[in-house]
Amino acid sequence: MNRGYSREQYLKLIQDIRKAIPDSSITADIMVGFPGETEEDFEDTLDLVRQVRYDSAFTFIYNIRSGTPAAKMEQVPEEVKTARIQRLIELQNNISLENNIQDEGKILEVLVEGETKTNREKLAGRTRTNKLVVFEGPMELSGRLVSVKINKGRPNLLEGELVLVSANK
């Protein structure tokens, strides 16, 4: 895929980021089933995900785009791509859950975005590392920074309780 860096360079970069910013959140976009991808290639991807331990990952299956060089290459069968993406999602969900459980008990600064999409009685916001946090509180907190104690880590979000509203408006 014409990457201008090696696996070793990439892992060194992740290590340097985590050393310089210990509470950083690392995310990725990961494609499965690019033409010519072998089972060994895919296992290397899973190994990289295990090593890096992304906080989250946007995962997707390669789709042919006519007129591109990849469209002319030997394609990975759809059933193989589907099985691989399921394995990758399961692995990443487990890692995301483990990472989010580590935030339990912490008080995190959250920028309130507004009510959640699924429960109008709860607010949603983002931490400085872009993790989604859901908690109870008044709608007038939208756009404000608040402190939220994290009670539960889930694969895709953190659940918490409001502990402090900052003076910003």
Image: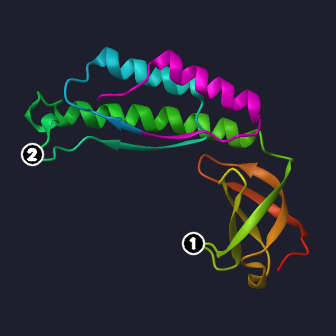
Q: Nearer the viewer, residue 60 or 17?
A: 17
* Quarter placement of the C terminus: bottom right
Q: Pick whichever, 5 or 57, lies toward us.
A: 5
Could you say where residue 114 lies in the image, as x and y percent from the top left?
A: 66, 76
Q: Is residue 147 magenta?
A: no
Q: Position of residue 155 (x, y in %)?
A: 60, 46
Which disc, if any, is residue 118? Answer: 1
SS for dot 1: loop
Give x and y (percent) for residue 168: 86, 75
Residue located 81% across and 53% down the image: 151
Q: Is residue 116 left or right of residue 151?
A: left
Q: Residue 67, which numbered label?
A: 2
Marks 1 and 2, how far apart at CA:
41 Å
Residue at image position (69%, 66%) is 125
Q: Residue furthest front?
A: 4
Specify the segment rendered in magenta: 1-29
The local secondary structure at tag 2 comes to: loop
Question: Which of the image's four quarters has the N terminus?
Answer: top left
Residue 28: in magenta span: yes
Question: Is disc 1 surrounded by few (<14), some (14 to 19) or many (20+) residues within 10 Å?
Answer: few
Question: Label 2 is placed on what type of residue?
Answer: Gly
